[in-house]
Amino acid sequence: MPDSVSQSDCVTDTCTLAKSLAPEDVRVGDYVAPLFETYDYASFFWYCDDALDDRSQTVPIRFLASESGVPLKVESVCLPFVLVKHPRRGSFTLDVRRHQLARLDGSYAKQAWKALKQRDSNPDRKRGKKRKK
């Protein structure tokens, strides 16, 4: 398995970890990735009986982020909102009350950013053609 990270890679400091961030730790210029998304559901949907709980209560459910691990570059911060740039889709806003973010290692983030950006810049891929070897 040549593409996998072996234990010896982590021992020699080539393996890095993403660091979970508190909202106040997000800084312009950081490369971040969403770890989790939290959604609130009405309690009567969760328990299937509105007599058990107050209808105004919600149940927070945490899911893995749909694009977990994709590097996003922080362009601006105005808590609870963070303006980020995606390598392929441009800029958009994340709400840190809903999204748990992690700071990515700089070398990983730059390498992943470049790879994802190049993936869409290949003209044959856009037309659905395979590359000739």
Image (cartoon, rainbow, N blue to C red):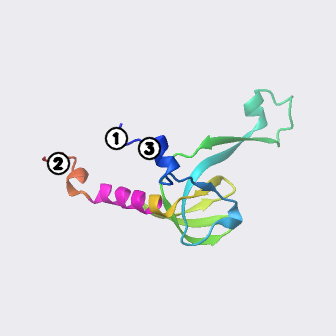
Image coordinates of residue 80 in percent, x first then y, are: 69, 64
Question: Could you tell whether 66 is left or right of 132 in the image?
Answer: right
- State how far apart marks 2 and 3 are (Cα): 28 Å
> From where the camera sits, is residue 79 visible?
yes
Q: Say which residue label 3 marks.
A: 5
Q: Secondary structure at mark 1?
A: loop
Q: Say which residue label 2 marks.
A: 131
Question: Could you tell whether 6 is left or right of 75 in the image?
Answer: left
Total tally of numbered discs in the picture: 3
The answer to whether the residues at label 2 and label 3 have Cβ atoms under 8 Å apart is no
- State how far apart marks 1 and 2 are (Cα): 23 Å
Q: Is residue 122 magenta?
A: no
Front residue (pair 32, 41) = 32
Residue 27, compared with residue 46, is above or below; it is: below
2 or 3: mark nearer the eye:
3
Q: Say which residue label 1 marks.
A: 2
Magenta extent: 109-121
Image coordinates of residue 98 in percent, x first then y, are: 66, 53
Image coordinates of residue 2 in percent, x first then y, are: 34, 41
Q: Residues within 10 Å of mark 2 (few under 14, many from 20)?
A: few
Q: Amino acid at mark 1?
A: Pro
